[in-house]
Amino acid sequence: MKLQRKIAAYRQLQNDTTAQLYSVASTLLAPDERALDATLRQLNQFGYDLDRLQFVAKDEVDLLARVQQDYDRFTQVVTQVMQLIREGRVAEGQELQLSQAGPLADRLERLTNQLVNKAEADMAARIDQNAEAYLMSRWMVVGFVVGSIGLALLLGFAISWSLVAPVKRMDARLKEIAAGDFSKQIEVPNRDELGTLAANLNRMNDDLALLYQRLDAASRHKSEFLANMSHELRTPLNAIIGFSEVLLERMFGELNDKQEEYLRDILSSGRHLLALINDILDLSKVEAGRMELELGEFSLRNALENGLTMLKERAGRHGMGLSLEMDPDLDVIEADERKVKQVVFNLLSNAVKFTPDGGRVEVAARRADGQVEVTVRDTGVGIAPEDQQRVFEEFRQVGQGTAKTEGTGLGLALTRKFVELHGGRISLESEVGLGSTFTFSLPLRTATAGDRRRAAGDEGAETQGLRDTAGGPTVLLVEDDPRAIELLTLQLEGAGFAVAVARDGEEGLELARRIRPGAITLDITLPKLDGWDFLCLAKSDPALADIPVIIVSMLDERGKGFALGAAEYLVKPVERDQLLSALHRFIRIPGPDGPAKVLAIDDDPMAVELIEAVLAPEGYRVLKASGGEEGVELARRERPALVILDLMMPEVDGFAVVERLRADPGTSAIPIVILTSKTMTPAEKARLNGRISHLAQKGAFDRAAFVELVRGFCPAPTA
């Protein structure tokens, strides 16, 4: 606004100057006294206007001063010209006008033009500045708006994150709690409802952790109770069953009919009680998640035939027919053999139990959708639809009315759990009066031809003959050189060993699993599976890990052999005494001077008495120790051919006895058979792995099987 007024003033000055100059010029051309006075007054008045203009033109002071100076000079010259004209010297006045007034007028006109031009230039510059300032301010406003929006978004994100993040952390914590992890606390700094929710979550976590600890303690106490119950009940049952069998074998004289009847009742009741204890323990293990599958390859046909054989006599008494139908190409499967056999036995025993006289029980096995499917069908009384799910519940017996049926009600419950433990399933179809059909399926895994031969028990004639005719422990030769086989066989048989031969590594593993020799001699350069691979597989197989392997090879790589678990390393050619010396360190053979000595270590006098009662008539001399310390001293002094050891003993328990016998060079090679009523944990089995020769349960004591087991480690001398 100021610039506009300034420009207007400058233009007025420009116009007034031009008008004054024109008026002066006109007056001087036609001089008149009155005109001259008027012109002079106008010039003086214009000078006053210039003086007032200095207050407006603060930026053009220098230029305006020049205008003022030139205007004053112009006024003086015009005054002189007018004076000359009044004096009648017109020519001099005109000369002065042309020489001085004219140039001053021109310069005044130029200066006023400059004032106007400068003011207009300043106006244009100020307009440009204002335009730039406007643009700048506009961008500042835009930036402020954008910044405000960004800040609002940032604050919104921060606020939302302060809500979302705690919720996510609490969700993750809930998942950890659901997985059983109660060890953490969630930290939420919010003082709102989320903070309260987090505090409640932490309290819930602490409460659940305490509850979980109590449940864990209860489960642990239950397991300890069951383990103790197992030991305390199985120990006397072992004596009851064992001595009953001994008496029924008439090892101490004849029995009358009543005595035999009562003994058989005692034996049957003992076995029934043992089966009940075993079922309860198995069910407890499954529910606690501690039941482990011992997977292995076995013949399904043999397992089914074995189940039918066990019930054949009972079915025959009631005129029942038993049959088995199998796919021709289905035989060897991979599963837990003991549990599959128990499943089969439970289903078959139920079928026989609830089938009337003259009925039929049929068993079928086939492949179906990548699984093996076993069906047990009977023509029994059937199961009502409302009871078909209840039959799989614990301690549940259905369809019996008021009559009490033998059994515990645990068989089918365990059957379903064992099947599900394998990843299979079991189903039931039944109609009252027509019979029932139980079908269970297991994942199918294929096996090699060698596995089929092994599972079917197809021993070669040569090996079987050697094992039958020789009197000592069996040594398995894994060798492909016929001359080496012949030489080693002569040396070993001459020393009293039985010899079995495998001509490649695969056959050697198969044969070792089947006959469980006392020792293995192994060549390294073998077809199919070389000696190094054989040794690795044997030592990783729990069934073979405790068998000493003596490498007999042309290759001298003792370091590698011992690192892989070889008991001894002999480089061919091997002298007879060198080979026998190595074998005698790991296998004991009864001497000709007396019966083989068996050391029984158990704090239960009845258990020791039972072992002596079974083994003494077979030609063994039984050494007895009632505690671990006494047993270790007796083993060091007598050097028995075999140690039979209980694990649960006061002071020095069976685990410590095993460790001390294995640490003593004089007793390290003595085979150890564990005979205990203790339920072994995986950690305890790992502790004994590779240190004992056999593990047996007292509750499953069978006299004939026990004698065969002892004979396998130390044959009794023959007359």
Image (spheres, rainbow, N blue to C red):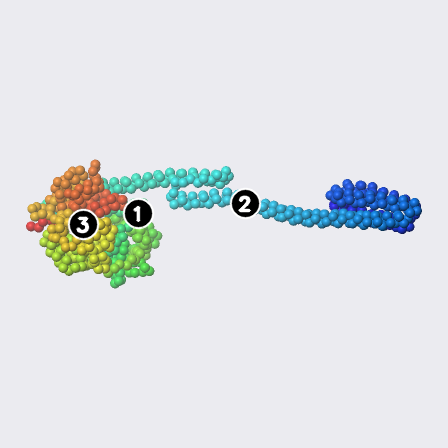
**What kind of element bears circle 1?**
helix
Left or right of 351, for residue 148? right
Where does label 3 land, which residue? Answer: 568
Q: Determine the CA span between mark 3 and mark 2.
A: 76 Å
Looking at numbered disc 3 in the image, what kind of residue is underneath it? Answer: Glu
- For the residues carrying marks 3 and 2, which lies nearer the camera in this image? 3
Q: Determine the CA span between mark 3 and mark 1.
A: 42 Å
Comparing 112 with 320, the one in front is 112
**Residue plotted at (18% across, 51% down):** 569
Left or right of 582, for residue 451? right
Comparing 591 with 309, the one in front is 591
Q: Which image quadrant is residue 333 in?
A: bottom left
Residue 315 image offset from top left, x and y in percent: 21, 55
Q: Which image quadrant is residue 601 in?
A: top left
Residue 480 image offset from top left, x and y in percent: 18, 59
**Residue plotted at (75% across, 43% down):** 62
In the rendered image, the vertical position of residue 82 relative to residue 314, given as above or below: above
Residue 40 image offset from top left, x and y in percent: 88, 44
**What kind of element bears circle 2?**
helix
Q: Determine the CA span between mark 1 and mark 2.
A: 55 Å
- For the residues carrying marks 3 and 1, which lies nearer the camera in this image? 3
**Residue plotted at (23% across, 49% down):** 563
Q: Earlier in the sequence, mark 3 or mark 2?
A: 2
